[in-house]
């Protein structure tokens, strides 16, 4: 993500959480808000189209080659 940020228009902001590391707060200027119960969900898609929700955040998730990483602005 940092490499993308350095080389493209892609922008993101993380906030360091004491227990779990970087929490993805905003992507391209759009921020999740507790008041609206919105957040950026981290998802990954296998080549066969199956999507799964990693049980770690952006600081720990390591995608396989060819895997698509999806950042989805959603509600909880
Ligand atoms: C509620 C919750 C959320 C809510 C928090 C918002 C809110 N205002 O309530 C939402 C839905 C946003 C959320 C999101 C995610 N979560 Co969550 N979440 C929890 C849960 C169930 C309770 C946390 C809590 O309220 N604690 C009580 C309060 C008083 O303590 P707190 O320290 O202030 O809690 C804050 C942090 O926990 C933080 N937080 C929540 N999830 C995550 C995840 C990461 C990676 C980080 C850095 C911080 C963080 O938000 C809380 C409120 O501010 C925990 C499981 C648990 N039982 O602890 C999982 C948990 C912390 N989440 C987890 C994960 C993986 C995620 C996601 C990465 C899932 C995903 N694939 O998208 C995303 C974060 C994506 C991002 N944007 O970076 C994992 C972290 C494991 C790890 N080793 O990294 C946990 C432990 C669940 C699990 N076993 O899989 N989560």
Image (tube, rainbow, N blue to C red):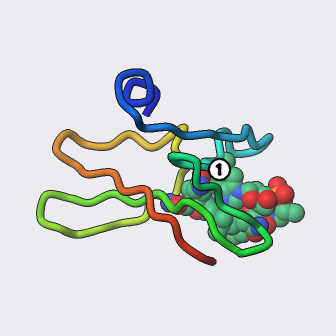
Q: In percent of the image, x 19 and y 39: which residue is there? A: 65
Q: Is residue 11 above or below residue 57?
A: above
Where is residue 49, by image quadrant? Answer: bottom left
Q: In percent of the image, x 53 and y 72: which residue is there? A: 74
Q: Position of residue 76 (x, y in %)?
A: 63, 77
Which image quarter is the N terminus in? top left
Within 10 Å of the Cα at label 1, are there few (<14), some (14-19), or many (20+) other Cα atoms?
some
Q: Secondary structure at mark 1?
A: strand
Q: Classify residue 20 as left or right of residue 62.
A: right
Where is residue 5, by image quadrant? Answer: top left
Where is residue 44, by image quadrant? Answer: bottom left
Q: Is residue 7 above or below residue 13?
A: above
Q: Is residue 54 above or below residue 20?
A: below
Q: Is residue 6 above or below residue 64?
A: above
Q: Residue furthest left?
A: 48
Q: Position of residue 48 (x, y in %)?
A: 12, 65
Q: Position of residue 55 (x, y in %)?
A: 51, 58
Q: In percent of the image, x 58 and y 55: which residue is there? A: 30
> Which residue position is annotated with label 1?
25
Q: Is mark 1 within 8 Å of ligand 1?
A: yes
Q: In percent of the image, x 65 and y 50: which residue is there? A: 25
Q: Classify residue 17 as left or right of residue 56.
A: right
């Amino acid at each position: 993500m940092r490499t993308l940020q350095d080389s493209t228009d892609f922008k993101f902001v993380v906030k360091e959480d004491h227990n779990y590391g970087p929490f993805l707060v905003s992507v391209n200027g759009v921020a999740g808000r507790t008041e609206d119960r919105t957040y950026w969900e981290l998802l990954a898609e296998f080549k066969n189209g199956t999507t799964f929700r990693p049980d770690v955040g952006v600081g720990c998730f390591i995608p396989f080659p060819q895997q698509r990483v999806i950042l989805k602005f959603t509600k909880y």
